[in-house]
Amino acid sequence: MTPMHLRNAPRWQTPLLLLLMAWALLAGLGMREPMPADEPRFVLAARTMVETGQWLFPHRGIELYAEKPPVFMWLQAASYLVVRDWQVAFLLPSLLAALLTLWLSGDLARRLWGRHAVPYAVFGLFVCLQFALQAKRAQIDMVLVGMTTLSLWALLRYLLEKPSPWLLALGTFAAGLGTVTKGVGFLPLLVFIPWLWVRLKSRQALPPHRGLHALAGLAGFIAGAGVWLVPMLSVALTSADPALHAYAREMLFKQTGTRYANAWHHVKPAWYYLQTMLTLWLPGVLLAPWLLPAWWRRVKRVDARHALLLGWALLVLVFFSASPGKREVYIFPMLPALAVVAAPLLPGLLRRRAVRATLWAYMAVLVVVAGALGAWLLAAPPERLQSLVEGRGMDMDTVVQLGRWLVGFAMVATVAMFAIARATRHRVGVALVTVTAALWTAYGMGFMPALSPDSSAQALMQRVGQRIGPDAELAMLGWREQHLLQADRPVTDFGFKQPWVDQWQHAHAWLLEAPERRWLFLRKEAIGPCLDPAKVVDIGASNRRAWILAPGDAWRAGCDVPADWSADVSED
């Protein structure tokens, strides 16, 4: 969103808002460590690629990591080779993908609706909470959305503007590359379904296309997917290593078709994505009562631009709703398309008093909730905050930092809202961009750096290093990726998914080789039957788990772990 009266607005206003938006996305870059969920395992795999030179098959410790293709990890590793700083490099792919997505959304809006729609598409996407949240996280999804938006940009240009086989090839190439980044990268190809509907309803609404162009589209998809699939399969299928065969089967079947049709985690009801849209798509979702009827009228008129964008978004929603496994990030690729298709309607909507009142109310609630929460964190007695910090390794200084940043955001946002409202009550879009930029600046420079030492396990692993001394050797059992990533020395591990009894047997042999200088790091619940509890060291809590250190002499002489023993612990 942007100022309502573009013609009467100062010429510097939109460039200033663009700078504010870019600042908010950049804020905090290099100020925190990788934090769960997902970030530590991707950075660990990327760091291993840089250290070992093995880029084709990502690793998590000694095991192959077969849950995601390596393309995102390639981007992180390549970023590190450029900037030589993991704190910056691990977030760069998401940041660059976010900037690309914003540019593509603005350019597509210009081509479909005219130049006046560009700022509405760009700022409309930026102010939705999920966009900046993913832009400032090192998860695959922002990069995936960059690829799906690029694919949709090229395919829509091909279908609506210029039937060039090069555009079709670019669109399918981006879809193929997205597929080997995260399995659902092929989703932009679904746009051909509403295109067929438009052709059936009104052939004059579309430019002519040639059937031979399908060969260019097929070649583009094969080239994109082949970036990883071809070298991976050529090595795996010609290797005698059963681990590589298992890796290929896991990636091609279990993590694709099986994960979609018979998900084993994140199982949610069919209506789950409604709550995602009602929360993470704020404040854009608040305009649904006005947008939905307007969109429906245009689809009924067989407006190809609306039909293709909205039809594609609906198909994506149906696709993910049909799977039992659901996460809020799955429908994220829809958001740029919806921002583009909303862009031509926003100037008119922002003239409506009810729309402006709704958006002002959203900002007021956001500011009041943040300020009240911050004030409570600063004023509440320590015993009231104990449940908040217990098990996370947090201390009261972290709580105070969070409180100060929340109050600071609330104060800055309030001043900005009053200043803009006094200038003109119609410029709710300017206030919305400003308040959103303040929120993500506080998030990047305040909230996340405050949480980082504890959530990333950096503080815990520093305590581990200090306790065992610089000359000791360390092994891990029942570890999480952040522990291996934050360790201050080379670490021995016995697998991530191996059965507990097998890990304990390897740990036993490893400890006995040099008990005087070797230590075992593990979850407190997984202490096992052969460790003397009197000799283990409680090293602290992190990520809602208690952790201990066991010196080599803590193993009871003559004790063997029973073959049927398993630690009674739950997964993170």
Image (spheres, rainbow, N blue to C red):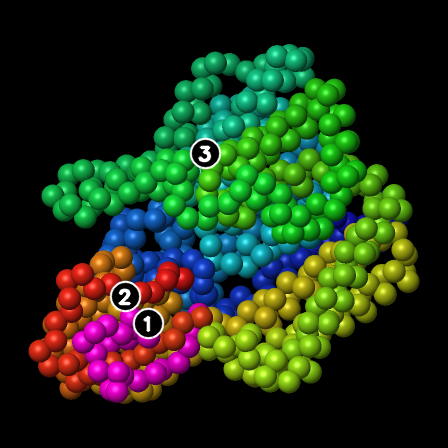
How busy is the neighbourhood of tag 3: few (under 14 within 10 Å), some, or many (20 plus)?
A: many
The residue that label 1 is drawn on is: 525
Toward the viewer: 530 or 172?
A: 530
Left or right of 92 in this view: 310:
right
Precedes in sequence: disc 3 or disc 2: 3
Discs 3, 1 touching: Cβ within 8 Å: no
Is residue 409 visible to the viewer in this orientation of the structure?
Answer: no
Name the residue: 24% across, 76% down. 520
Q: Is residue 480 left or right of residue 195?
A: left
Count of marks, rendered view: 3
Q: Which residue is mark 2?
A: 567
Please rate how many residues cluster around mark 1, counting C-alpha atoms within 10 Å: few if below 14, some from 14 to 19, many from 20: some
SS assignment at label 3? helix
| Callouts 1 and 2 close, C-beta under 8 Å | yes
Task: Evaluate if marks 3 and 2 touch, with contact meaning CB atoms under 8 Å apart.
Answer: no
> Which of the labelled discs sits on residue 83, or is there none?
none
Q: Residue at x 60, y 51 (%)?
A: 131
**Is residue 334 among what the camera can see?**
yes
Per the rendered image, the range of residues in magenta is 520-543
